Amino acid sequence: MATCPPYPTNPPRPHWWQRGWVRYGALTTLLAISGLVILALVREQTGTQGFLVGLGLAVLPVPLLMAAFRWLDRVEPGPWRNLVFCFAWGACAAALIAIIANSFATRWIATATADPAGADTLGATVIAPVVEESAKAAAVLLVFLFRRRDFTGIVDGVVTAGVTATGFAFTENILYLGNAFGTDQLTGDSGFASVTAATFFVRVVMSPFAHPLFTVLTGIGFGIAALSTGRHHLRRALLPLAGLLLAMGMHALWNGSAAFGEYGFLAVYGAFMVPCFGLLTWLVIWTRQRELRTVREELPAYVMAGWLAPAEPHTLASMHARRLARQYARRHAGKQAARAVAQYEAYATSLAFLRQRGRKGRAGPDFAVRERELLDALWHRRDVARPALDHAARAAAPPPVAPWPGYGTPGSHAGYGYGYGYGYAAAAYAGYGYAARPGGFAPVAPYGGYGHGHPAPAAPAFTPAWVPAPFPAHARSRPAYPSAHPAHHQPLPRRP
């Protein structure tokens, strides 16, 4: 009976358009051409002086917005190339599409209706929101389709959409501020009474979050779609579309606020924009905290399998402890070590999210391959990361609590590694491997359990010296945790 080899001996070669360098080259060329064309168009409309003034003023809110979105993405930071692409797409490609499409549509409406004023109003309240939000949503769609590993939830959608909108607002602010400066040059106005000052106050001081706020709704739709299972194809398609329609509606309301009377702009700003901004800010921060909770809940399975140290799930679930670990590595081993610790934290977070998706039935067919890749990445960085994370766990641990009279006796329970207080006492396997001592907490070898009285693994995969050790025979026979993916029903991988 003939048998097939497990792997193809001569795998088919990809077509030339499927090669990575071809796609990167085509995308870079497209963005570069778009940037040159948009630069020429904006400079033609504003003049050289107006362009320089607009550029200098429009760049002011960009670092703040980028830092805010990067802060949201600190739990599982995505690669910088994605953020650079999103910003470049918003500033170049999306802005070019908006300028050309808006101008063409407004002129066509003015010619058809013989009403230039009405055409401008219709273009600002109907045409511009549809064109601009669609152009910005294209970047979110491209990252969602071609960088699926980096797009796993709501926070990724918010960051991708927000950075794209920040780039778009940057180019648009150059145009508006440059035109305002040109108007002041003609009228001779200057100072706080100038059109440039008024435009700067409205667009940069009062509403730098306007465009990111609109497009974030689209990003949330894509983020929820990323959390949906593969069986819900209709929902995965409708959620991004619903987010895009909400973004268009909010954008249209904002652009049309000037038509609501003398105080229409302030009414829309105070009664609608600011509350929506506050609500979405709370949503993304809550989602960020939920991601940290996922890290704390999913990683203990890999502790039992020997891949992680017992203290690491709680250490990696604290942004303060993560920062302490990076600082420790930088102080004692340099920038390269700090970068390795940051990568270790990012890979461990991705592993937690992958396991959660597998446990909920949302993992793809490459679950086992991706899991092995992440575990190998952690293994190669363990020598640098583990001492830093151990230091962060001890530095971020809460101080011992003095006992209350009559509230339990020391040594009655093995718990969190606290020597006294509420009936918890130090033991050989107390808490997460840390025992109480007068100067603080120190790691215990062998590693302890998870706290709450759970026992330690029979034989850890790592020695206290942070070097790999083979599993003994009795450890190999010990049952391991099942895989998170329900279709696999295989034990968690162990490091030989």
Image (cartoon, helix red, strand yellow):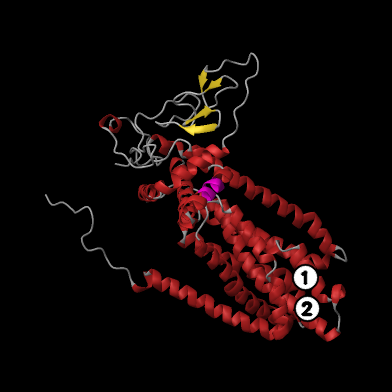
Please state if 278 lies on the left or on the right of 488 as rendered. Answer: right
Residue 90 visible in the shown view: yes
**In the image, what residue occupies the spot 49% across and 47% down?**
349
Picture coordinates of residue 215 (x, y %)? 63, 61
Give the residues drawn in magenta, as a range: 322-328
User: What secondary structure is found at the residue carrying circle 1?
Assistant: helix
Picture coordinates of residue 449 (x, y %)? 44, 29
Viewer-proximal residue among 35 and 441 = 441
Of all residues, the one furthest to the top in this rendering is 406
Please state if 228 lies on the left or on the right of 272 as rendered. Answer: left
Between discs 1 and 2, the one toward the N terminus:
2
Residue 325, magenta (yes or no): yes
In the rendered image, the quadrant that contains the C terminus is: top left
Picture coordinates of residue 413 (x, y %)? 51, 19
Viewer-proximal residue among 50 and 387 = 387
**In the image, what residue occupies the spot 74% across and 67% down?**
204
Picture coordinates of residue 13 (x, y %)? 28, 68
Spatial separation of the CA atoms under disc 1 and disc 2: 9 Å
The amino acid on which the numbered mark 2 sits, given as a three-letter code, is Ala
Residue for badge 1: 200
The amino acid on which the numbered mark 1 sits, given as a three-letter code, is Phe
Residue for badge 2: 180
Q: Does 479 appear above or below 235?
A: above
Q: Residues within 10 Å of mark 1 (few under 14, many from 20)?
A: many
Viewer-proximal residue among 234 and 101 = 101
Of all residues, the one furthest to the left in this rendering is 1
